[in-house]
Image: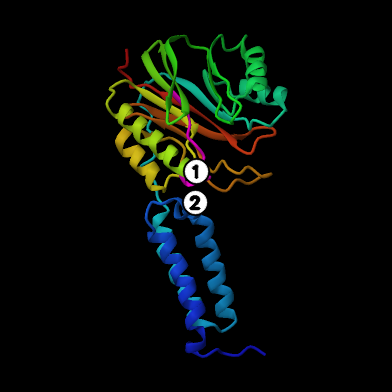
Amino acid sequence: MITTTSPHRELLPATIVLAIAVALAFSPDAYLPMLARAFLLQWSALFMVLAVLLLWRRLRWTALSSALGCVLILPQYHQPATTHDVPTGSSSFRVAHLNVFQMNERYEEVLQRAIASGADVISVQEVDNDWADALRVGLASNYPHMHVEARGNCYGIALFSKLPFTEVRTSEVSGTPFIEAIVRTNDGPVRILSVHATSPISYAHFQRRNALLANLGEDIGASTMHTVLLGDLNTVHWDRAYRSFSTRSGLMPVNGQAMRTWPSIGPIALIPLDHLMISPGLGASDVQRFAIPGSDHRGLVADIHFPANAS
């Protein structure tokens, strides 16, 4: 038999539920809250389901706290404005991003998927020596211009291009490498950044990730060149570090927060850790994600459009 619980007996569980929701919604930009806040959508769904179940059990005050928790959390799930604007009469080139997962040994399948993307420029992350060898051999005929920074700590990185580099180099912030290249196109030079920010698995790594994003954001913001960033930034659109990076750099996301890429488990992925971002004046179309055989990430691909009067 279902009975109604008196309000005072619900005081403790209702308070705990509401306290968790308030912490998720309004906690400062610190390590542990950031990890929990990465899954805001899943938290809000959990609170709503819990509210329905509690109401069915006649636990009205706890159900009310859970529903209020959902209301508090959902407004935090937002992002900087996404741009899919395509200038009329513009030309374009295609970019793709793949985090291949260093321990993955399905080299041939991944290479076939990368080539099938039709991208003019491909960013590849988690490149160790074995992946570096496979990529150089497998992509050389389609992508003659390449820059590879192989590392064994999951932060090796590579950039492959059909378009020639006029400049390319590996830079490093707080021990984290990223590739910066100037690509020559028929519409002028484009700065391409391939970035794999540190995974915030500890407070020290959290600081390293934020240092990279802050440094890179200031550098991009000071440049007037058309810029495209591809990478696993190990942050989500509603994270304060991401919003700060977008503000500093002036870059706008191409893939929205609904385009989740990690962890890729069968037909689902939970949060958008991988990103394509472009500077104002550029546009994007045909934005897609795709499965990467053997990887825990999904790839991203998009057509990047120049202003119609580019030269």
Give the residue pinned by disc 2: 35
Residue 285 is at least partly visible in this image: yes
Amino acid type for the residue under numbered disc 2: Leu
Q: Tell whether 93 sits left or right of 268.
A: left
Distance from the alpha carbon under mark 2 to that under mark 1: 8 Å
Please state the horizontal and vertical placement of residue 287, each as a whole percent of the image.
50, 33
**Residue 296 in which image quadrant:** top right
Q: Within the magenta stretch, is there residue 9? A: no
Measured along the vertical axis of the image, is residue 159 above or below residue 218?
above
Q: Are marks 2 and 1 in contact (CB under 8 Å)?
A: yes
Which mark, residue 60?
Answer: none
Q: Quadrant of the N terminus?
A: bottom right
Quadrant for the C terminus, please. top left
**In the rendered picture of this protein, how many numbered marks are placed on residues?**
2
Q: Which element is circle 1 on?
A: loop
**What residue would you read off at disc 1?**
200
Q: Quadrant of residue 127?
A: top right
Q: What crowding class fits label 1: few (fewer than 14 Cα within 10 Å), some (14-19), or many (20 or more)?
A: some
Q: How far from the left and from the top, in percent, is residue 82? A: 39, 39
Residue 250 showing in the rendered view: no
Name the foreground residue: 259 vs 62.
Answer: 62
Q: Secondary structure at mark 2?
A: helix
Residue range highlighted in magenta: 193-203
Question: Mark 2 vs mark 1: which is more N-terminal?
Answer: 2
Q: Nearer the viewer, residue 275 or 188?
A: 275
